[in-house]
Image (spheres, helix red, strand yellow):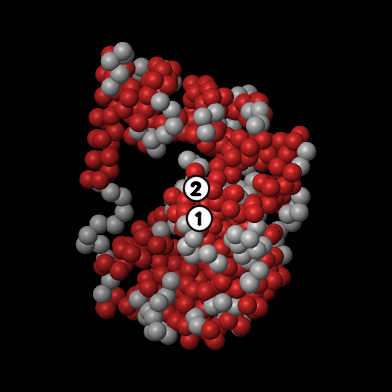
Amino acid sequence: MFASPTETDIAPSGSLLGLLQRGRGDGWLHALAAPRPEAMAALDRCVLHDPRLDWQLEHRSLYYARLYAELDADLGALASHLFHPDDLGRPEEERTGLALSVLGHLTSYDNDAARGLLRRYAVEGANWRWALDELAVRDDDAGLRALGPAVLGRFPATEEGEAELVAAVRDAFEPRPWRLWAEDPAHPRQRARLARALEGGHFDRWQRQLRPPGPRPGWSVAAVLDWAREGYESTPRQWREAPAARCLSAVAGPEDRPELLRAAADGEPPVRAAALRHLAERDDPDVCPLIEAAAVTGDADVARAALTAFSRMCGPGVLAQARRWAGRTDALGLTAATVLARRGDAHDAPSVLGALHRVLRSGEAGTCEMRPLVEGAGRLAIRGAAPLLRYVYRETPSSQLRGHTAKALAAVDPGFAAGFAVECLWDCEEDTRETGARHATTGDTRVMERLRRLATDPAEEAGVQTAVRGRLDGRAAP
């Protein structure tokens, strides 16, 4: 089972709010069929209280924007949220990022109210950089130029203010507004100031390239391990396991193997992790016992590093070792099962299916643990996994995991084309919509209408439109 709704603040999967929070296609369809006030309340709740497990990886903005457009919804709730007094006290991107992204997509649909809110927020809001990036790819030159004086007014003409301006220009995700302002003949002082800021940003990047942090050529194995330890002891802590292992690959020779084996057996946590990673990536013949010992240690960092190290091994003996460990019910057994899910053959299907059962029963199923098992069930075409995959599809709060589950269902569930594949066409994730476009049966009248709309939607992603046009042209029909 997945975490309870009270723990994740996600409503039950059968409710309108729960469907919309998950970004499921059925949520979109249910919202259109529900009384409009109920649909609007649920939609506003989702946008104002971002339901995503990982807002940097999961997509919802286009999904919600399309629904606002379909409902011809008022944007008053979004405006109240953006310009609430909390905006100054809580400037975190997580509070306003989803609302700003929704407004950006609505601007793509020529929604003047959305464009006006973005322009106003770029001038007044705490998360103004996000609003400016949304406008940078959607607003016209005149609209962007008009914002220049107000945005530059955020940076006082002091040494500190100039330094902040240099950093803002250098780190801008979308450089178009800054370049327009730097070339605007109507504001000569603005042009001169931005010219200095652009030059300062280029100089900062050049300096960082000349003096990169981290190990230098000529470092010894001991020096690299010391560097890993220093990061672990710093504030904030820097876990340098992966970069240290890469450095070891460049400096370690056969004569250093005894030192690395000792470090992997009983070194301090960061040293042990780096050594384990290095030895595993070279398929050292003695690394598996060290991984097994580290995986059951009381140190969570060392255990995690050991499991990661084993999951990255690619040598000829890895599958045999994974098969020996896959029957275990601890974290090492789960990692072994994921290795089989990614690289095993049909004989490993029972181990993968068993691990999938155990993870779901544990009540602590997360995306990281579930994804390789879900993908493995599809890769190995495990027909017995279909009921479990349907459950994952319906219940998971992760839209990314649902997308991987949809692909697996396409391989193992004969009813997918007429069932979940149709719903996928309205999903929040691009890859899931593409899966629906490739597999949904055209016997459902909604499918052809939806395919035609996706084919002409200017906000739709290229991969989805390629799949859609292939179906409309009569190719790759299920």
Residue topped by disc 1: 472
Residue at image point 53% right, 84% down: 346
Residue 107 pos. (x, y %): 51, 31
Give the side of residue 263 with respect to residue 90, left or right: left
Residue marked by disc 2: 455
Residue 181, percent from left and from top? 33, 22
Residue 360, placed above or below residue 58: below
Label 2 CA crowd tier, 10 Å (few <14, some 14–19, many 20+) = some
Q: Is residue 442 visible?
A: yes
Q: At x 41% / y 54%, what residue is drawn?
A: 231
Q: How many marks?
A: 2
Disc ID at residue 7: none
Examine the rendered structure and indicate whether residue 90 appears above or below residue 379.
above
Q: Cβ–Cβ below 8 Å for labels 1 and 2?
A: yes
Q: Nearer the viewer, residue 332 or 473?
A: 473
Q: Is residue 49 visible?
A: no
**Sooner in the amino-acid sequence: mark 1 or mark 2:** 2
Mark 1 or 2, closer to the camera? 1
> Which residue sits at x=28%, y=29%?
198
